[in-house]
């Protein structure tokens, strides 16, 4: 089961990033930062990695992951029975090969059995800064 968590506990709330970014953790344990969009406002970013997410209350559930098509389109899935649908886009893959590896890591986690959430200390969540600095 693909696990995720907000960026906001790692950063000050007053800058508003908690509602814009979400981390999804792959089977390897690596965390991948995603920008959050509602389906109607998701930009066409060919080749980006997407996660379709159903949100009900404060809970986000990853439904499926994939790559945005060359035409910038994301496949249609049935709408959630309750709550909202979000599209989470990962835009930091170095190239197509890295995107394939990241997607495979995330899909492997979605296909596997649910894992226990990683333990956190000090009330903060880990931030994988190398993703933010690798450019």
Image: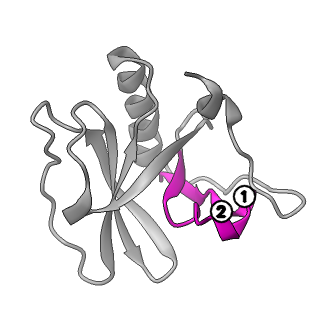
Please state the extent of the stretch shown in magenta in the rendering.
1-24
Residue found at the far left of this picture: 71
**Left or right of 117 on screen, residue 111:** left
Q: Where residue 119 sits: x, y (%)?
A: 79, 55
Residue nearest the viewer, comparing 95 with 80: 95
Q: How many marks?
A: 2
User: What's the residue at 15%, 40% (across, down)?
Assistant: 72
In the displayed structure, 72 sits above or below 62; it is: above
Within 10 Å of the Cα at label 2, are there few (<14), some (14-19), or many (20+) other Cα atoms? some
Q: How is the image coloured?
A: one colour
Q: Where residue 94 sits: x, y (%)?
A: 44, 19
- Secondary structure, mark 1, is loop
Q: Where residue 91 sits: x, y (%)?
A: 40, 36
User: What's the residue at 49%, 60% (across, down)?
Assistant: 20
Question: In the rendered view of the protein, which quadrant contains the C terminus?
Answer: top right
User: What's the residue at 66%, 56% (across, down)?
Assistant: 116
In the displayed structure, 1 sits above or below 93; it is: below
The dot on residue 60 is none
Residue nearest the viewer, comparing 10 with 112: 10
CB atoms of marks 2 and 1 within 8 Å: yes
Within 10 Å of the Cα at label 1, are there few (<14), some (14-19), or many (20+) other Cα atoms? some
Disc 2/disc 1 C-alpha distance (Å): 5 Å
In the displayed structure, 113 sits above or below 28; it is: below
Residue 7 lies in the magenta stretch = yes
Among the 4 quarters of the image, the one containing residue 13 = bottom right
Residue under label 1, please give it.
11
- Secondary structure, mark 2, is helix
Residue 88 lies in the magenta stretch = no
Residue found at the far front of this picture: 15
Among the 4 quarters of the image, the one containing residue 102 = top left
Q: Where residue 10 sits: x, y (%)?
A: 73, 56
The dot on residue 8 is 2
């Amino acid at each position: 089961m693909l696990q995720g968590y907000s960026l906001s506990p790692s950063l000050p709330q007053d800058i508003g990033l908690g509602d814009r970014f979400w981390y999804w953790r792959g089977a390897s344990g690596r965390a991948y930062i995603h920008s959050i969009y509602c389906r109607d406002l998701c930009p066409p970013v060919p080749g980006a990695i997407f996660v379709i997410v159903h949100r009900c209350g404060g809970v986000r559930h990853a439904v499926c992951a994939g790559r945005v098509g060359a035409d910038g389109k994301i496949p249609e899935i049935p709408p959630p029975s309750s709550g909202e649908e979000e599209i989470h886009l990962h835009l930091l893959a170095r190239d197509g090969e890295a995107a394939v590896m990241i997607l495979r890591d995330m899909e492997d986690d979605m296909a596997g059995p649910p894992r226990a959430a990683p333990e956190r200390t000090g009330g903060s969540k880990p931030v994988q800064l190398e993703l933010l600095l690798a450019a």
